[in-house]
Image (tube, rainbow, N blue to C red):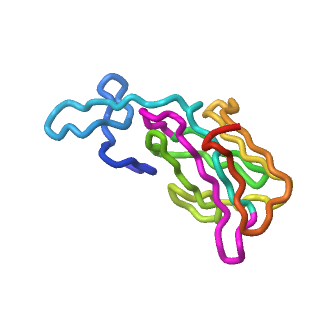
């Protein structure tokens, strides 16, 4: 089994009614207890660095606006002018939590295999069917300076 980003004090387990791998509460020696998840629309593109200092990676931060429930990333897509990243394997962002992804042309659960454009870029978070969940646009990114939302997840 291949899985992505996990959150503390939870496990991956089979949902007994669907057979799918999902986030569970720890129940060693007992039936799995599926943890309730927030909808994908709880995620926001929160902060990004599109023109990193030489030798440093670009990055994107996602924020789970739900203060109680984690949100699943599996199947979601981050679309940029440079490429599309599809989140694979069970991956989650903790309630009220942040997750940073390096846009460094590398592979891994917290990497994108492209860099961000430093000029006239956008970041779109889409559901598995391509429906827009969130979008930010930026003009020219200053070297070593991130852009973001204030307050976290705000307009």
Residue 50: image x %, image y %?
Answer: 73, 60
- Residue 37 sits in quarter: top left
Q: Position of residue 13 (x, y in %)?
A: 31, 38
x 73%, y 39%: residue = 135
State whether residue 83 is above or below residue 96.
below
Please tell me which residue lies in front, 147 or 71.
147
Q: Nearer the viewer, residue 99 or 30?
A: 99
Q: Residue 154: in sight, yes or no?
A: yes
Q: Position of residue 119 (x, y in %)?
A: 85, 58
Q: Nearer the viewer, residue 76 or 134?
A: 134
Q: Is residue 17 left or right of residue 73?
A: left
Quadrant occupied by the C terminus: top right
Horizontal side of 16 relative to 111 (left or right) equals left
Q: Quadrant of residue 75?
A: top right
Q: Is 149 on the left-hand or right-hand side of 143?
A: left
Residue at the far top in the pictured view: 17
Residue beneath the point at 65% across and 30% down? 129
45 over 30 or under it: above or below = below
**Which residue range is magenta in the image?**
51-72
Q: Furthest-front residue in view?
A: 151
From the viewer's perspective, is 61 left or right of 138?
left
Seen from the viewer's position, the closer of residues 10 and 147 is 147
Instruction: Determine if the magenta segment contains residue 70.
Output: yes
């Amino acid at each position: 089994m291949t899985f992505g980003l996990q959150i503390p004090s939870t496990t991956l387990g089979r949902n007994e009614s669907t057979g799918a791998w999902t986030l569970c509460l720890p129940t060693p020696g007992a039936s799995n207890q599926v943890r309730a998840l927030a909808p994908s629309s709880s995620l926001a593109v929160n902060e990004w660095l599109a023109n990193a200092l030489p030798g440093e990676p670009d990055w994107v931060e996602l924020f789970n606006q739900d203060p109680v429930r984690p949100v699943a990333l599996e199947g979601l897509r981050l679309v940029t002018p440079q490429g599309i990243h599809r989140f694979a394997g069970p991956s989650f962002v903790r309630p009220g939590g942040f997750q940073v992804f390096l846009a460094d042309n590398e592979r891994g659960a917290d990497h994108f295999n492209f860099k961000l454009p430093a000029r006239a870029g956008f970041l779109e978070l889409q559901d598995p069917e391509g429906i827009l969940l969130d979008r930010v646009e930026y003009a020219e990114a200053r070297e070593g300076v991130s852009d973001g939302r204030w307050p976290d997840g705000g307009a």
